[in-house]
């Protein structure tokens, strides 16, 4: 995030202008027109965070998974793209969870059928 400093005369206060960039596309966006929402977390990032949390600090896994994330700016034109990406990542997560459930349930069902 780049910060532009506009200096004023000594009799007035210093004015700080911060340039924001869309978290999805990287396009510069002003704070007034930015769409603020939680960051997009991909399935890969989620699995990576869980694995690193389990290996390095298992006690913080609850914080990693359930802590509220600060909102980031998005360009208004990226709203549809963001919604599409979020839906795709939710579908990946759902399919991943179904695979895990199937891998756990298959041996149990095979043993129950004997």
Image: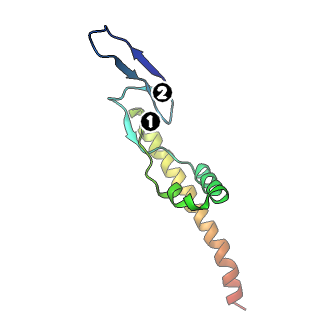
Circles 2 and 1 in contact, beta carbons < 8 Å: yes
| Residue that label 2 marks | 27
CA gap, disc 2 and disc 1: 10 Å
**Dot label at residue 52:** none
Residue sitting at 49 percent across and 51 percent down? 87
Query: Mark 1 or mark 2, which is nearer the start of the sequence?
Result: 2
Q: Tell me if residue 101 comes above or below residue 84 in the rendering.
A: below
Q: Position of residue 56 (x, y in %)?
A: 66, 55
User: Tag 2: Cα neighbours inside 10 Å, few (<14), some, or many (≥20)?
Assistant: few
Q: Residue furthest left?
A: 11
Of badges 2 and 1, the one in the foreground is: 2
Q: Indicate the quadrant where residue 97 lies.
A: bottom right
Q: Residue at x 43, y 51 (%)?
A: 68
Q: Name the quadrant containing residue 99.
A: bottom right
The relative height of residue 18 versus residue 23 in the rendered view (above or below) is above
Give how far across and how far down residue 33 sits, in percent: 34, 30
Residue at 52%, 61% in the rendered image? 62
Dot 1 crowding, Cα within 10 Å, few <14, some 14–19, many 20+: some
Q: Is residue 111 above or below residue 33?
A: below
Q: Is residue 73 left or right of residue 32?
A: right
Classify the position of the C terminus by image quarter: bottom right
Q: Nearer the viewer, residue 38 or 114?
A: 38
The image's colouring method is: rainbow
**Is 8 placed left or right of 89 in the picture?**
left
User: Residue 14: horizontal and vertical position, in percent?
Assistant: 33, 16
Residue ID for mark 1 = 78
Residue nearer the viewer, 29 or 53 = 53
- Residue placed furthest toward the front: 10
Residue appearing at x 38%, y 34% in the figure: 76
């Amino acid at each position: 995030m780049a910060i532009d400093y506009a200096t004023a005369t000594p009799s007035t206060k210093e004015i700080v202008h911060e340039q924001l960039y869309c978290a999805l596309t990287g396009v510069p966006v002003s704070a007034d027109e930015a769409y603020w929402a939680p960051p997009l977390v991909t399935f890969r990032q989620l699995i990576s965070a869980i694995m690193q949390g389990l290996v390095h600090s298992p006690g913080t896994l609850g914080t990693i998974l359930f802590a509220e994330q600060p909102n980031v700016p998005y360009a208004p034109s990226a709203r549809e793209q963001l919604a599409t990406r979020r839906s795709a990542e939710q579908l990946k997560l759902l399919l991943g969870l179904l695979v895990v459930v199937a891998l756990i349930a298959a041996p149990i069902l095979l043993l129950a059928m004997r």
